[in-house]
Amino acid sequence: MKIKNLFGLTTPTYSFEFFPPKDDAGVANLFTTIKNLRELDPSFVSVTYGAGGSTRRKTIEITKTIKQATGIEAMAHLTCVGHSRSEITTILEEIEAAGIENVMTLRGDPPRGQTDFVPHPEGFPHANELVRFIRARKNFCLGVAGYPEGHPEAPSKEIDLVNLKRKVDAGAEFIITQLFFDNRYYFDFTARARAAGIDLPIIPGIMPITDLAQIKRFTQLCGAAIPSSLLAELEAVDGNKDAVAQVGIRYGIKQCLELLQNGAPGIHFYTLNKSLSTRTILESLRASLPSPE
């Protein structure tokens, strides 16, 4: 099923994001996580795509396996990094042949060791061009990224919103946001998007905190801020892995409840291929919120 059609059937949607592991042991652990989370009946899951297409084969294989073996709707990520138009056409054919109907279309980050994004000479420098290219050739349901705190490379939030509108106008059908921890950014971003004529579902992307050093690294890369009160609470228990995870769970429950109670169409969990925190947060949300009619 195309993800755009889920929003009329399931409110709210709950979805999980995974990344392709580097080795067989990691793959085994990933499918253990998927098995554990399958019991929560997610609306869909997505599988990320390595810089320069470094996990291209695994992305497609894992997405296909999830859909066929578990029955969960699955979405493959695709980026512009390192690919020519002809290579992207081949990848799209592979995704289509695997029975995958949903694609998350992204510009992508520079490969490791590079600071600037350099497009393939026969490829695309921007995600909106990738969206338009796919829309003209295939009937996938296309998702794109949104940045509540602004893309780190954008000169301003206003210009970043113009870039999002380009992706929408090119044929995107839903938006998943970058991670954030202050809901005010999401609500402001959504209001500005609506004022700009963007009426697609905007799904907040949430990353349960399990490691302080890790989340500091992630937020520095994507330009997200950790609220001072949350940071102080995490730093007070830093070094105690279980205590950090519990702080992350409590904050995640509070954050997600506020989002859903104020109109967010769902939650997209950046799981980091782990199940415990995501499972605990989602179970609490379902226990706290009224069942959809």
Image: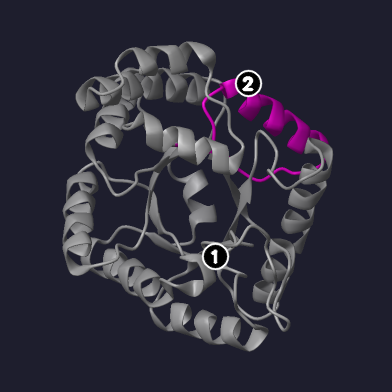
Asked if residue 154 is positioned above or below residue 267 in the image, the reply reads below
Q: Give x and y (percent) for residue 94.
A: 45, 83
Q: Give x and y (percent) for residue 132.
A: 72, 70
The boundaries of the magenta stretch are 179-206
Looking at the rendered structure, the kind of residue marked 1 is: Pro
Would you say 59 lies left or right of 86 here? Answer: left
Asked if residue 233 is positioned above or below residue 95 in the image, the reply reads above
Q: Which residue is at a point 71% across and 73% down the rendered structure image?
A: 124
Would you say 13 lies left or right of 184 here? Answer: left
Q: Which quadrant: the N terminus?
A: bottom left
Disc ID at residue 184: 2
Q: Nearer the viewer, residue 198 or 128?
A: 128
Q: Is residue 191 magenta?
A: yes
Q: Is residue 72 magenta?
A: no
The mark nearer the N terminus, 2 or 1, is: 1
Q: Nearer the viewer, residue 82 or 278?
A: 82
Q: Nearer the viewer, residue 42 or 255?
A: 255
Q: Which residue is at a point 37% across and 57% down the rendered structure image?
A: 19
Element carrying mark 2: helix
Disc ID at residue 111: 1
